Image (cartoon, rainbow, N blue to C red):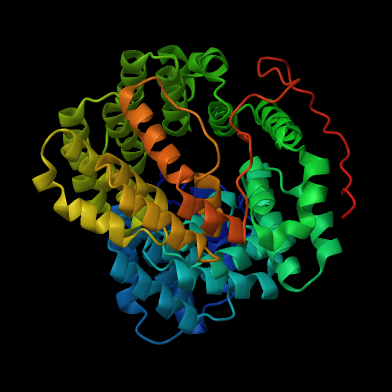
Amino acid sequence: MLKSGRIALAMMVAAMVAAVPVHAQVVPQAQDADALQVGIGRFAEPAERALLPDLATALMQKESRERLAALDALLARLDRPTQLRGIVQSMRGAMLLDQYRHPEALAAEEEAIRLAPGVPPVKLYAVHVMIFAGAPQRAADLWLALSREYPAIAAGLGGYELDALRERLRDIGDNKRADALSARIAEVGVATHSGPRASDGALAQIRLRMGEGKIAEAAALVPSVLVTRDLAQLYLDRRYEALWPAIARWGGQDLGLGQKLYLEALRRDWHASNTLEGATDYARALNGVRAYAAVTQLFLPLLAPEALKLDKDGAEYLAPPVARAMLGQGQAEQGIALLKRVDATFTEDTAQKLNLSGNLAETYLTIGRFAEASATASEWLVIARRMGAEINKAALIGVQAVRACALIRGGKADQAGGDVADVLMARTGLPDPAMDIYACRDDFAGGKALVIESLNDEHRRGWALRWIQPSGVNLPFEESRRSDRFQKRIAADPEVRAAAGKVGRILPMTVIERLPDGFDPMAPADLHAPDQEAPPVS
């Protein structure tokens, strides 16, 4: 659901002096002090050099509050508009973000950019802060400009931050910037470049090529659209009808071949990385094709108490899809117990805990325990609002939708008005939570209007076309069956089908919802991916 945004101060030091790994997630150590003073000293005026040891000492502090206090004291002594003051402000911005003081963090980064425009790492740090302090559009513009001037430095931001930036742009309906960002990420390359990120970049590039009338170039990128859900966006939308034959040859008429390639790639990535992050991507994809038993067999052992004592990095992301796989097998209590157990390993109110408790609230709703769902969602929202803009809008609206639905289904609809209003107001960028509200209220007219409205909007059309495709019940619980009945009623409506036929198509079979032929999720991975050639356009 979400992840805390943190880049350690070691990133700044590394970018300045190449003394430590760029993605080191630790505060600079004492042995780095000399390198830090030499590196940052290049940007200090002669009269400021005496302050460099104090800067090094400030950055050696173990606690974020202590580092911020030391940087505040140093800033007071840097009372002239110099590059060194800009660098210090850049670092302060990250510490202010750590304390959820987002307006101050943004102000610090803006001053840093003004004072040190020729120091590229300052801009990179500013992008990171702006992503998680509520300024994603400014962050995107700054990163795109940096990627043109210093592509290697821009690529050093890392895949997670860029994923978060793209998601936050889409949350607010800024698909144009999100596509530009994705296309540029694919061109520049990112150190943690995963299959899904590459797929999103290829999808954005195809949209751009088709907009320019370059059909052959767009078709050549079809094999790079690895995520089957992304491929389906093209396969259902008439704007890309010229690519449909090539997509069918590459991915199969029901996209089953493409799904098999995607699952094989995720399995390779997991075995190659041997991380919980890699396991999470594979687990989510297997859930998408209802391979619930495989998910629990493969990944539940990685979340055993003894395993978490050795390594829990990423457990907050793997636990929810494993719990969902348990729900898929009717094992609700086991799924709840798993989420609670992993949650207990995180002792402070952090984004990691929110990721777990948010999924717990959704699980309670799914199995019809409405009072527990609304109470858990309420606790989540109190903590999330204290953390401010660091928590992305999609997570906030999603949990508000859970609480609203729990109240409505629990006979307390009169208490859900505020949440319902917020969720429906955000429907342009976040249609799924809005549709959840319509389904909970059995508001057929509202759901139908949202689908038709989205079909007529070129930026939301992809969501609407996917939503009305043939589908099956996700989970063996009444709430899931109710949602499925609601979806089928809207998808069968003559006006909805007529609107869909003008801009896309509804396929006669389900796509990307079943395990593809010939794929065994339990089989060992072939770490050597086959060469892939683009299919001809026709």
Residue at 48% in and 16% down: 300
Is 263 left or right of 25, judged from the image as shown? Answer: right
- For the N terminus, the quadrant is top left
The relative height of residue 444 versus residue 340 in the rendered view (above or below) is: below
The relative height of residue 411 versus residue 437 in the rendered view (above or below) is: above
Q: Position of residue 375 (x, y in %)?
A: 16, 35
Asked which quadrant contains residue 186, the reply is: bottom right
Q: Taking the image as drawn, is residue 246 in sight?
A: yes
Q: Position of residue 336 (x, y in %)?
A: 31, 20
Q: Nearer the viewer, residue 372 or 71?
A: 372
Q: Position of residue 80 (x, y in %)?
A: 39, 87
List the single residue furthest toward the bottom: 80
Is 331 left or right of 144, judged from the image as shown? Answer: left
Q: Nearer the viewer, residue 216 or 473?
A: 473
Residue at 16% in and 39% down: 407
Residue at 36% in and 24% down: 342
Residue at 62% in and 56% down: 504
Is 455 left or right of 187, judged from the image as shown? Answer: left
Q: Position of residue 502 (x, y in %)?
A: 60, 61
Tag count: 0
Q: Taking the image as drawn, is residue 163 in sight?
A: no
Q: Nearer the viewer, residue 54 or 287?
A: 287
The relative height of residue 7 versus residue 102 in the rendered view (above or below) is: above
Asked which quadrant contains residue 469, the reply is: top right
